[in-house]
């Protein structure tokens, strides 16, 4: 048991330390090349003038860089490489057990993390107008969702063909044999969780919520003796906490798409590998709440010709009501911890 605990916590501590150490380098270049949005959001998703959004979040004057998510995923990969190097130099049982890269458990979520991070990075660079004649709007929503859907399809196809995965576990029901339909199911879940990336709109909010979700899946993976996945989850938590150290108000940088795309897609893959896909919406409930509030707002305006929320996503609604941003953030953190704990309990008892 002691070796398993070390496998969980040492990668987490290392990732946190590495994330803290590389942040000054990352922020130096982010500020040197002025990698922040040069204009505020002008229109809502349905084409109306975003008056409240401009009032609450004036990106033109903030000059806070994007791409802070680089700290999270790069620290995870650096930690993985460091632990592999330590084992190569000092091969023994302890250094062998600390490694968390394995073909059976973690190569797929790590591959997805890297691919999604690169797509998100392209979007971020476009937003800050680093690419030639880029408009600064970033990749379109259709392109981003299409990219996530393609990643999800590739994951589902691999699991179906290579691992013969055709069943999904539903708590209190049992295994459901879905056959080839496992691919569209994974697509729906991954796109849905990615849509919750709109929660990255207040300093510290997304990091706290995602940290709770990954701790939840670390607990599930550990319970199933999938210790490499559990260690990966905890390493990601360490990277998120390093990012959060610099993202609390006033934020030095934002997570943005390179972080949110990497983390939400990886979270979904881990949910599939731990056979806990159907508790993912519970564990990641704040993400679902953020995405759902945006969808509800669009439907409500179309049907009833008025807004359901003052502004969507819902965390901005509370800001518009007059809540200080730190109150919104901390209450969402509490919801995140509660929902992650509840999801773990339901999965284990179910």
Image (tube, rainbow, N blue to C red):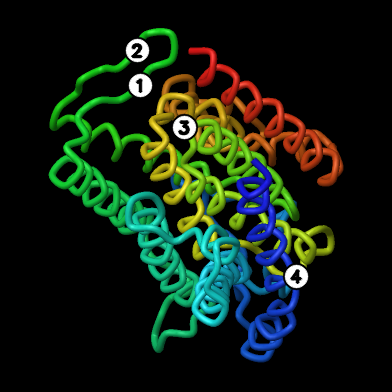
Mark 2 nearby-residue class (10 Å; few <14, some 14–19, many ≥20): few
**Label ID, residue 295:** 3
Of marks 2 and 4, the one in the foreground: 2
Q: Which residue is mark 4?
A: 62
- Pointer 4 with pointer 1, Cβ within 8 A: no
The Cα atoms of the two marked residues, 1 and 3, are separated by: 27 Å
Percent x, y of residue 282: 54, 25
Mark 3 nearby-residue class (10 Å; few <14, some 14–19, many ≥20): some
Earlier-in-chain disc, 2 versus 1: 1
Percent x, y of residue 273: 37, 40
- Pointer 2 with pointer 1, Cβ within 8 A: yes
**Label ID, residue 174:** 2
Earlier-in-chain disc, 3 versus 2: 2
Q: How many marks?
A: 4
The Cα atoms of the two marked residues, 2 and 4, are separated by: 50 Å
Whether residue 270 sits left or right of residue 12 in the image: it is left
Whether residue 74 sits left or right of residue 310 in the image: it is left
- The residue lying toward the viewer, choosing from 7 and 292, is 7
Q: Label 2's element?
A: strand
Q: Which residue is found at the position 75% from the left and 55% from the top? A: 203
Q: Which residue is mark 1?
A: 169
- Residue 312 in view of the camera: no
Q: Which residue is found at the position 62% from the left and 64% from the top? A: 40
Looking at this rendering, what residue extends furthest in the top direction?
A: 172
Earlier-in-chain disc, 4 versus 1: 4
Instruction: Give above or below for 299 relative to 60.
Output: above
């Amino acid at each position: 048991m002691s070796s398993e605990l070390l496998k969980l916590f040492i990668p987490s501590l290392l990732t946190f330390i590495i994330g803290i150490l590389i942040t000054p380098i990352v922020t130096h270049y982010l500020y040197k090349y002025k990698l922040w949005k040069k204009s505020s959001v002008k229109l809502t998703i349905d084409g109306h003038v975003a008056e409240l959004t401009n009032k609450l979040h004036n990106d033109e004057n903030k000059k806070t860089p994007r791409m802070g998510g680089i700290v999270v995923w790069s620290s995870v990969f650096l930690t993985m490489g460091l632990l592999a190097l330590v084992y190569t130099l000092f091969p023994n049982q302890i250094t062998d057990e600390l490694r968390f890269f394995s073909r059976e458990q973690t190569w797929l979520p790590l591959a997805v993390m890297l691919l999604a991070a690169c797509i998100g990075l392209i979007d971020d660079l476009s937003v800050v107008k680093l690419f030639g004649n880029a408009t600064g709007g970033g990749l379109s929503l259709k392109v981003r969702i299409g990219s996530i859907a393609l990643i999800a399809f590739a994951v589902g196809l691999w699991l179906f063909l290579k691992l013969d995965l055709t069943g999904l576990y539903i708590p209190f029901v049992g295994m459901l044999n879905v056959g080839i339909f496992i691919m569209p199911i994974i697509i729906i879940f991954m796109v849905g969780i990615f849509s919750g990336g709109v929660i990255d709109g207040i300093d510290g909010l997304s990091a706290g919520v995602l940290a709770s979700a990954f701790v939840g899946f670390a607990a599930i993976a550990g319970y199933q003796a999938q210790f490499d996945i559990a260690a990966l989850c905890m390493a990601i938590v360490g990277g998120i906490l390093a990012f959060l150290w610099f993202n609390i108000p006033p934020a030095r940088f934002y997570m943005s798409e390179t972080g949110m795309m990497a983390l939400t897609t990886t979270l979904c893959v881990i949910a599939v590998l731990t056979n806990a896909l159907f508790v993912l919406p519970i564990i990641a409930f704040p993400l679902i709440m953020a995405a759902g509030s945006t969808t509800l707002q669009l439907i409500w305006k179309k049907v009833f010709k008025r807004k359901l929320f003052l502004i969507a996503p819902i965390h901005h609604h509370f800001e518009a009501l007059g809540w200080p941003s730190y109150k919104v953030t901390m209450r969402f953190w509490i919801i995140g911890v509660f929902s992650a704990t509840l999801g773990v309990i339901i999965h284990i008892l179910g």
